Amino acid sequence: MRLALLNAAQKAENTRENFRRELDADLDVFHCPSGELPGDLRFDGFVVTGSWASVYWDREWIGQLKTWVGDAVRAGLPALGVCYGHQLLADVMGGRVEGMGEYEIGYRTVEHDGENRLLDGIDERMTVFTTHSDHVVEEPPGATVFARNEYGIHGFRKGRVFAVQFHPEYDMATARAVTSGKDRLPEDRIQSVLDGITAENYEAACEVKQLFDNFLAFVEHIQQIRTNTT
């Protein structure tokens, strides 16, 4: 199984290694902010990672990424978006993304409806790590929202596209590093989040890593459909 990993993170290495650890597939990695993008659509699926950027910024690499993703979605490639990837897929497919005017950060509770195959086998009340100041305020036309909390939409699906706002790929070291880097937040807020990055919370959040296997199973299912129709 060959996937394109569209790495939108500022610090490419940590994000790349987190996804390599969780996705049991051949990953072709492209660091999008450096201008790297696949030259074609010859993949079984693709994943769009988190980022420090906003999807509504006027940046050349963001426009190029949107173009490739739009072409891939129209071609029927299975897709998984995480955080920024969630927002970018929503934007590309006609949804709406806005700044929140605040941060959601730290281990939080998100609820899902129990009816989406991406979250099969995961408790309907999930512990997840979040860090974002933008959110999807309107899902794409025809999409189904399957996860929410008090900050809004945390998961949607449309066709072969799945997207989640939280970070199932994070380990504790990544959570600490990302939190410590939020210099726009008050020190006491940062310390409160750091205090919550415990082995107990991480273990609880590890349940959502199941979604990576669920996504790969979906990609394999699409491969079988394509094989049977050719």
Image: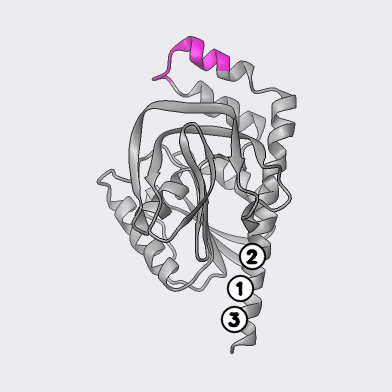
In which image quadrant can residue 94 be found?
bottom left
Kind of residue indicated by mark 1: Ile
Quadrant housing the C terminus: bottom right
Q: Position of residue 50 (x, y in %)?
A: 48, 43
**Disc marking residue 75:** none
- Point out the stretch of residues depicted in magenta: 183-192
**From this viewpoint, which residue is outermost toward the bottom?**
230
Q: Position of residue 146 (x, y in %)?
A: 55, 49
Residue annotated with mark 2 = 218
The residue closer to the viewer here, 119 or 86, is 119
Report the residue at 62% width, 42% height from top.
Answer: 168
Report the residue at 46% width, 71% height from top.
Answer: 41
Residue 191 is left or right of residue 125, and the answer is left
Q: Is residue 169 above or below residue 190?
A: below
Kind of residue indicated by mark 3: Arg
In which image quadrant can residue 23 be found?
bottom right
Q: Is residue 142 above or below residue 172?
A: below
Residue annotated with mark 1 = 222
Image marks 2 and 1: residues in contact by CB distance under 8 Å: yes
Q: Is residue 23 visible?
A: no
Kind of residue indicated by mark 2: Phe
In which image quadrant can residue 66 be found?
bottom left
Crowding at dot 2, Cα within 10 Å, few <14 / some 14-19 / many 20+, comes out as some
Q: Secondary structure at mark 1?
A: helix
Is residue 138 a member of the stretch shown in magenta? no
Residue annotated with mark 3 = 226
